[in-house]
Image (cartoon, rainbow, N blue to C red):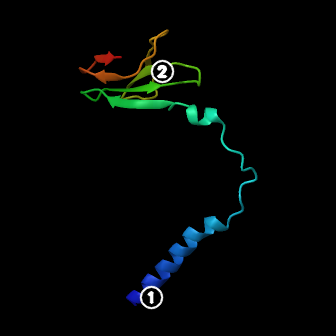
Amino acid sequence: MKYRKNTILTLFLALALGLPALAPAAESDEPYPLEYWALRSVISSVRVSPDGKYLALMKIARRDANPVIEVYDASDLGKKPFILNADPMEITLFRWVGDQDMIVQ
C-alpha cells in the first residue's frame, strides 16, 4: 500500500513539474529593456514603531521620483498617511528611535 501511494505521488509530481516544459514558447523572445532592470523597489524599509501604533515605509511613487516616508496609523491603515519628503535631497534610510520619533538619513 505504501509503495502504491509513493508511486502515485511520484507520478503526480512528475506531471505537475513536467507540464510547464510542454507549454509553447512565448511569442517574443525579446530581452527585457535595460530600464526594467534598473527600477528601484516601489516600497521598502517597512518598520513598525516601538509601541506598535505606527507603520512607516519608504515609497517611490514614480520612476523619476525620490523616495518619501509614509507613516500610517496602525489601527486604521485606511487613513491618509503622514508623508515626509526630503526634496531636493533623497532619503536613503530611516529608523524609529522612540514611539513617535525617527531618524532619517
Residue 4 visible somewhere in the drawing: yes
Q: Residues within 10 Å of mark 2 (few under 14, many from 20)?
A: many
For the point 47% across and 78% down, the residue is 9
Secondary structure type for disc 2: loop
The location of residue 10, given as percent across then percent down, is 48, 78
For the point 72% across and 62% down, the residue is 24
The residue where tag 1 is placed is 4
Q: Quadrant of the C terminus?
A: top left
Q: In this view, does 72 lie above or below 4?
A: above
Amino acid type at circle 1 is: Arg
The residue where tag 2 is placed is 67
Q: Nearer the viewer, mark 2 or mark 1?
A: 2
The location of residue 91, given as percent across then percent down, is 42, 18
Amino acid type at circle 2 is: Pro
Secondary structure type for disc 1: helix
Q: Is residue 24 left or right of residue 93?
A: right
The location of residue 43, given as percent across then percent down, is 47, 31
For the point 29% across and 26% down, the residue is 49
Q: Is residue 79 left or right of residue 99?
A: right
For the point 59% across and 20% down, the residue is 64
Label pair 2/1, CB-CB below 8 angstroms: no
Please give the count of numbered marks on the rendered protein.
Answer: 2
The front one of 84 and 92 is 92
Query: Which residue reaches farthest right?
Result: 27
- Residue 1, picture quadrant: bottom left
C-alpha span from label 2 to label 1: 57 Å
The front one of 39 and 51 is 39
Q: Residue 96 carries which label?
A: none
Residue 81 visible somewhere in the drawing: no
- Residue 21, picture quadrant: bottom right
Q: Earlier in the sequence, mark 2 or mark 1?
A: 1
The front one of 71 and 68 is 68
